[in-house]
């Protein structure tokens, strides 16, 4: 059983079983919705996910609905009955253990930011680096 929540805890969820996939999406819609360069998702059957609390819903395109916490703004779920009938995508960074579902693929690479392929070449720090 996987569990997760929004940042403030107003919405909690449980997901049972294995997801159909776990992926990192690079599409412009995910970037705009999350304010991040990419978003991790895991697709579950809707009946395998129990949600406590009421998410706000935003129809981000003709068939797609994004679900987020109306209090803290955390993006949580994505549904699209045309592309993913009977399923719900969960943002994996909202899991209580975000490392539980490592991505198996990167999707929508046609829309990825140009620097993504070289991100491993950028200097990295264990914590915020000290100033000058």
Image: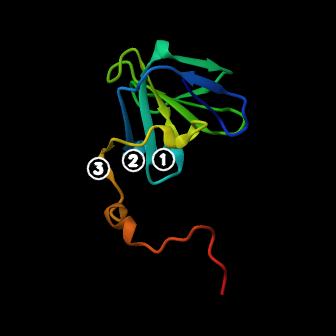
Residue tagged 3: 109
Mark 1 vs mark 3: which is more N-terminal? 1
Q: Is residue 131 above or below residue 97?
A: below
Circle 3: is it few (<14), some (14-19), or many (20+) Cα within 10 Å? some
Which element type, helix, strand or loop, lies under badge 1? helix
Which element type, helix, strand or loop, lies under badge 2? helix
As measured in the structure, the alpha-carbon distance from the residue carrying label 2 to the one carrying label 1 is: 6 Å
Q: Residue at x 36, y 65 (%)?
A: 115
- 65 or 22, which is in the foreground? 22
As measured in the structure, the alpha-carbon distance from the residue carrying label 3 to the one carrying label 2 is: 10 Å
The reply to whether the C-beta atoms of the residues labelled 2 and 1 are less than 8 Å apart is yes
- Across and down, in percent, residue 19 comes to 40, 26
Residue tagged 2: 28
In the figure, is residue 81 to the left or right of 35? left
Which element type, helix, strand or loop, lies under badge 3? helix
Q: Residue at x 65, y 26 (%)?
A: 12
- Across and down, in percent, residue 89 comes to 45, 29
The picture quadrant where one finds residue 14 is: top right
Q: Residue at x 48, y 12 (%)?
A: 47
- Across and down, in percent, residue 54 comes to 66, 21
**Res 76 label:** none
The reply to whether the C-beta atoms of the residues labelled 3 and 2 are less than 8 Å apart is no
User: Which quarter of the rendered picture does the N terminus lie within?
Assistant: top right
Mark 3 vs mark 2: which is more N-terminal? 2
User: Which quarter of the rendered picture does the C terminus lie within?
Assistant: bottom right
Circle 2: is it few (<14), some (14-19), or many (20+) Cα within 10 Å? some
Residue mark closest to the camera, 3 vs 2? 3
Residue sitting farthest toward the bottom? 132
Q: Is residue 87 above or below residue 41?
A: above
Residue tagged 1: 32
């Amino acid at each position: 059983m996987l569990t997760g929540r929004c940042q403030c805890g107003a919405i909690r969820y449980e997901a049972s079983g294995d997801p159909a996939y776990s992926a990192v999406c690079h599409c412009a819609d995910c970037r705009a919705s999350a304010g991040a360069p990419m978003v991790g998702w895991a697709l579950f059957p809707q009946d395998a996910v129990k949600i406590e609390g009421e998410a706000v819903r935003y129809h981000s395109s003709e068939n797609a609905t994004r679900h987020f916490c109306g209090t803290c703004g955390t993006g949580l779920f994505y549904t699209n009955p045309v592309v993913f009938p009977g399923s719900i995508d969960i943002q994996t960074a909202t899991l209580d253990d975000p490392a539980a579902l490592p991505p198996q693929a990167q999707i929508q690479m046609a829309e990825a930011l140009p620097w993504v392929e070289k991100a491993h070449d950028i200097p990295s720090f264990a914590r915020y680096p000290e100033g000058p």
